[in-house]
Image: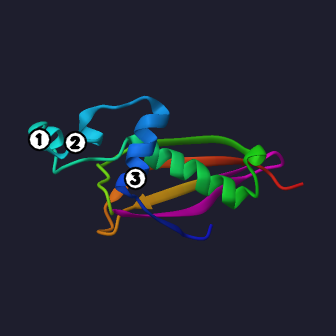
Amino acid sequence: MPGHTVTVTRDQITRYAAASDDDNPIHLDEAAALAAGLPGVIAHGMLSMGILGSVATEWAGGADRVRKVVCRFASVVRPDDVLTYTGIVSAVDDSRVEVNVSVVNQRDEPVLTRAVVVFDAPR
């Protein structure tokens, strides 16, 4: 699957917090994040997974062809991190296509692991 790169912005994090009703200060307040032992404000893990869902939808040619998106959160994502989503087809049968997805940041560190997307097979 072709690679897709996204730069995570503080605005995306703030908008995701509002949309998800998750206003945990580690996502919004630098001092609170530092006090919690983090390197600063971090993105919601589900934001990175949501971007994976968007990338999968683009690969599939529409959300109606995406059956399942699963992953594990491997490391924190900070504002201005550049995430690269790439996929390799791992299984195909008459009804589905399974893709193993790699999601790394600009330092080539895994952000999401065990990421798999299952699509309806092309007709």
* Residue 72 colored in magenta in the image: no
Residue 67 vs residue 57, the one in the foreground = 57
Q: To which residue does mark 1 refer? A: 37
Q: Would you name the residue on which mark 3 appears?
A: 11
Q: Residue at x 73, y 47 (%)?
A: 63
Which quadrant of the figure contains the N terminus? Answer: bottom right
Mark 3 vs mark 1: give the one in front: 3
Q: Residue furthest right?
A: 123
Q: Specify whether 60 is left or right of 101.
A: right
**Real-space Cα distance between discs 3 and 1?**
22 Å
Whole-percent x, y for residue 121 in the image: 80, 51
Determine whether the residue tagged by mark 3 lies in a helix, strand or loop: helix
Res 10 quadrant in image: bottom left
Can residue 92 be seen?
Answer: yes
Earlier sequence position, callout 3 versus callout 1: 3
Residue 72 visible here: no
Task: Determine if the magenta segment contains residue 98.
Answer: yes
Residue at image position (35%, 57%) is: 110
Find residue 29 and name its label. Answer: 2
Callout 2: SS: loop
- Between circles 1 and 2, the one closer to the viewer is 2
- Residue 104, position as x, y percentages in the image: 39, 62
Q: Which segment is the magenta one?
A: 81-99
Q: How many marks?
A: 3
Left or right, 23 with respect to 63, comes to left
Coloring scheme of the render? rainbow
Q: Amino acid at mark 1?
A: Gly
